[in-house]
Image (cartoon, grey):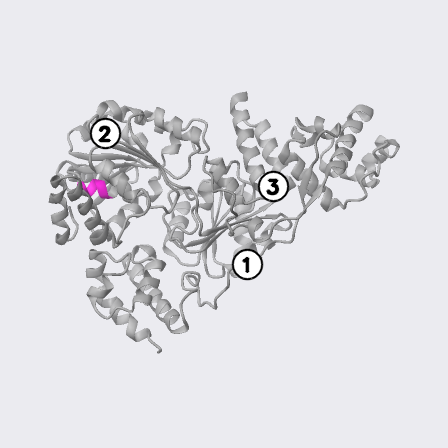
Amino acid sequence: MSIPSAAADPISALREGDAGQTDAALEILSRVFGYDSFRGDQAAIIEQVAGGGDAVVLMPTGGGKSLCYQIPALLREGTGIVISPLIALMSDQVAALEAVGIRAAFLNSTLDLHEARAVEQQLLAGELDLLYMAPERLVLPRTQDLLRRARLALFAIDEAHCVSQWGHDFRPDYMGLSVLADAFPEVPRIALTATATEATHRELTERLRLQGAKHFVSSFDRPNIQYRIVPKASPREQLLRLITSEHEGDSGIVYCLSRKSVEQTAEALVARGIPALPYHAGLDAAVRQDHQERFLRAEGLIIVATIAFGMGIDKPDVRFVAHLDLPKSIEGYYQETGRAGRDGQPSTAWMAYGLGDVVNQRRFIDAGEGDEQFKRNARSHLDAMLALCETVSCRRAQLLRYFGQDMGEESCGNCDTCLSPPETWDATVASQKLLSALIRLERERDQRFGSGQVIDVLLGRENERSAQSRHQELSVWGIGTELTEKQWRTTIRQLLARGIIEAEGEYGVLVPGAHAGPVLRGEATVELAVDRAPARSTRSRSARSGGGARAAEGLGIAERDRFEALREWRTSVAKEKQIPPYMVFSDATLVGIVEARPTTVAQLGEVSGVGAKKLAEYGEDVLAVLPAASTD
């Protein structure tokens, strides 16, 4: 093991029994990774896998999943094999491990034959602690033969939800990983994911043949993320206001549904002086890779992307994730928003959502490929996503309930519906008028329309289609003038989400939905939310000289000066080493250094996130920066 010599004793302590193994794990946690204690189920998971047992781990992004296989791989004899779909990120994952003194490598299609052979020789010689590879490589007979000739510590199956055939991120190659149960029966396996409903949990357990594994399910709550969903007006202008008023200089991710929207949004941000890059499948592969690497290495850069971007992104200081279009599922939304605030610092998950999102998503499902079962599954995912958008109760509670977890009756205090509870109104009569208009148009004129023409009929507004079809003669003409056009659009959007009306076909024509009958008969009341002005964050904004100020908000003026000096030093080191700044030290660690005000290397080593290798490599430089930045 290529960790500091002081960590050698814990490895031999493994053979002393459970107490020795626990002490060894804690020693590695402290000496290698620079942390004093485990969080949540980490210690129990490590004990299970280090002892040779299998595990299924459901833990939120930023919860420390990687330590759950990295430490057992260091404790056990041999090399830990990490199976990941993220070829584009393996180089950075390996660099992060090497930065703390762990011997790591990857085998994927980016290596030429000579480089791949060199890695294979390292594996066979026992010179690697961790080896990353993609699932399609692992299932090859040649790869399995190579692994049989090596000494293996464990198999870690990352992003294990990808094996779920009906999930949001299915990867067919993951189906072949069940072979590990027979091919390597003595090697412990750990499957990890941050995104799994109870159904996905059962499916991945069955498909990976982990029925005998011990299961660890942590809370999916990310309390540092503030969830906010606003009515869509001019989404790019709304995004600009979010960035300039709350996240100027911060790193962030903006998700759009189409490549065209990605390009236009990135251009709009750049035109306003905000550094941004596009990322989508239509770009050349080399350009995509360059944009991803620049995002990981730069501070204060925004990436505008389709959902193809971000899985496995380990950038801890992403301060906001914004959606300009509705995600297809809560799983996708949770995974995407989870890329914010991995360092535990306050972050924002913001989305602009409107009527067009609902109509477009339903049209995509109806017109898409796949059998009826696939489409039913897609509609179910969308219905759950719409329910989250339209809820008048705590968004965090609804999000957790979807994953089978209950946070009780208390409000979270950190989502828009808790910070500014929405006003509701009795929309029963308005709903009946809308349904009556849809029924009259079809029965008396054999016509179906999208929302625009239906609203014109309700408001009694004449247009060419109304004149041609004599809509003025209908009994429903002009019966909805108590609401404005904007209010009718809000009403239609919410009724679509509840299944009281539905949008059908290529043009999204409106028809009564499955739940329309009781409303028309007066057997059910309809309470809807009033669209409100966009909620503003309750967090204070500190004066900043760039990104990273959110992490330093609690610091005094002199302390913030030291924090900024450390950030400048970190940036120069990262550029010299050609690694992301967070691989030197995270913002949270820099804050810890500023607050501790160490004057010796030993004192610096007590700060969380400062492991032995980083202490030896950077300790003297950090101590030199601190007094130079002092103003008090």
Return the mark for residue 390.
3
The span from disc 1 to disc 2 (Cα, nearest Å) is 49 Å
The residue type indicated by label 2 comes to: Thr
The residue type indicated by label 1 comes to: Ala
Along the line of sight, the residue nearer the viewer: 234 or 100 = 100
Do we see residue 599 in this rendering? yes
Horizontal arrangement in the rendering, residue 611 relative to residue 564 (left or right) = left
| Residue 178 image position (x, y, % from top left) | 30, 25
Q: Which residue is mark 2?
A: 143
Secondary structure, magenta segment, majority class: helix
| Residue 443 image position (x, y, % from top left) | 80, 24
Q: Residue furthest right?
A: 473
| Few, some or many residues within 10 Å of mark 2 (<14, 14–19, 20+) | few
The span from disc 1 to disc 3 (Cα, nearest Å) is 33 Å
Q: Residue at x 70, y 44 (%)?
A: 425
Q: Residue furthest front?
A: 409
* Label 1 element class: helix
| Few, some or many residues within 10 Å of mark 1 (<14, 14–19, 20+) | few
Disc tally is 3
First to last magenta residue range: 71-75
Nearer the observer, disc 2 or disc 3?
3
The residue type indicated by label 3 comes to: Glu
Q: Residue at x 26, y 58 (%)?
A: 610
